[in-house]
Amino acid sequence: MANAPGNARYLGTRCVVRVQAGQAEAGLADCQQALAQPGNAANALVSRGQAWLLLQRDADALADFEAALQANPQHMRALYGKGLALARLGEGLRQQALQRLP
């Protein structure tokens, strides 16, 4: 980190890697730091969205992917992440509906 203390792309990547490694708190702190850097909001939001997906916080992920798409409507990783989040949220709703069937 000493070589790139303010590099938003590095922080966003490290955010996701840390969450994958089970270091959710440290990873999300990296995402927050990446969001504080100027000019890279869409990428930082996508990284945090990916972290939320890893933590199974699909609604939070969807919110970040949608915010990234507001900044850059053609952001491919945001579009893909939004699709994943919507699919997972839809599956959750389907499971809830199935549980209520007699």
Image: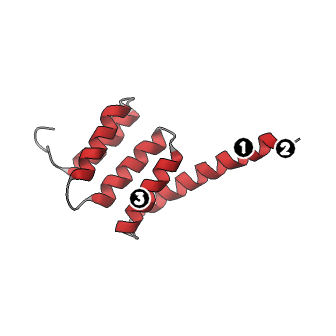
Disc 3 crowd, CA 10 A, few/some/many (<14, 14-19, 20+): some
Q: Is residue 45 left or right of residue 40?
A: right
Residue 57 in picture, x, y percent from top left:
50, 42
Q: Mark 3 — residue?
A: 77
Marks 3/2: CA–CA distance: 36 Å
Q: Amino acid at mark 1?
A: Gln
Residue occupying the far top of the picture = 22
Q: Quadrant of the C terminus?
A: top right
Residue occupying the far right of the picture = 102
Mark 1, secondary structure of its residue = helix
Mark 3, secondary structure of its residue = helix
Q: Is residue 40 left or right of residue 57?
A: left
Disc 1 crowd, CA 10 A, few/some/many (<14, 14-19, 20+): few
Q: Residue at x 68, y 48 (%)?
A: 93
Q: Earlier in the sequence, mark 3 or mark 1?
A: 3
Residue 82 in picture, x, y percent from top left:
50, 58
Q: Amino acid at mark 3?
A: Arg
Marks 3 and 2: which is nearer the front? 2
Q: Mark 2 — residue?
A: 101
Q: Mark 1 — residue?
A: 95
Task: Give above or below for 80 relative to 58.
Answer: below
